[in-house]
Image (cartoon, rainbow, N blue to C red):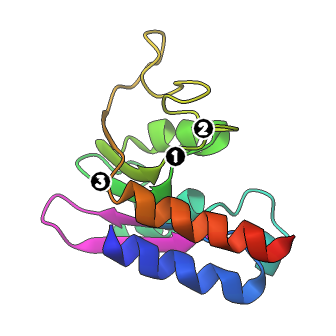
Amino acid sequence: MQEAIAIARQATATGDVPVGALVINKDGVVIGTGSNEREANNDPTAHAEIVAIRNAAARLQNSRLDGCTLVVTLEPCPMCAGAIAQSRISHLIFGAWDAKGGAVGSVWDVIRDPRSLYKLDVTAGICESECADLLRDFFEGQR
């Protein structure tokens, strides 16, 4: 998670919300990283999770990331939760909960919904305070 937090801090340079993500393969090797790039690239889909998944899939030359773990500093939104399931990631680890738009247990639970076609393990709240503080500091600076 510390590496994801370091990636998140880089996003603030472009005015993006500081969220960082990385994909780790079954051997523990980081194969994709991403931070929010919505503002940097004028792309509403450029969330940290999507960027990291795209990088990992390109590196593996495969759209399926079976056996991989996604580590992200903030609970994924519905779009990212869907992308996580579609990519067949096996384990999701996230830091801070998103009480306004989270889709892995706070507002919705897209990933663990019994009707979901793909099931994966979820670990929540890793370095939760540090991840939440990063976001809080960013938004306080915006006001």
Other residues around mark 2 within 10 Å, as few (<14) / some (14–19) / many (≥20): many
Residue 83 coordinates in the image, percent (x, y): 55, 43
Magenta region, residue range: 22-36
Q: Which mark is residue 102?
A: 2
Q: Which of 133/107 is in front?
A: 133
On the image, which quarter does residue 134 sit in? bottom right
> Residue 35 magenta-drawn?
yes
- SS of the residue at dot 1? loop
Q: Which of 60/15 is in front?
A: 15
Q: Are marks 2 and 1 in contact (CB under 8 Å)?
A: yes
Q: How far is mark 3 from mark 1, CA to CA? A: 14 Å
Other residues around mark 3 within 10 Å, as few (<14) / some (14–19) / many (≥20): many
Q: How far is mark 2 from mark 3, CA to CA? A: 19 Å
Q: Which residue does the numbered mark 1 point to in the structure image?
A: 75
Relative placement, left or right, of 75 versus 66 is right
Q: Which mark is residue 69?
A: 3
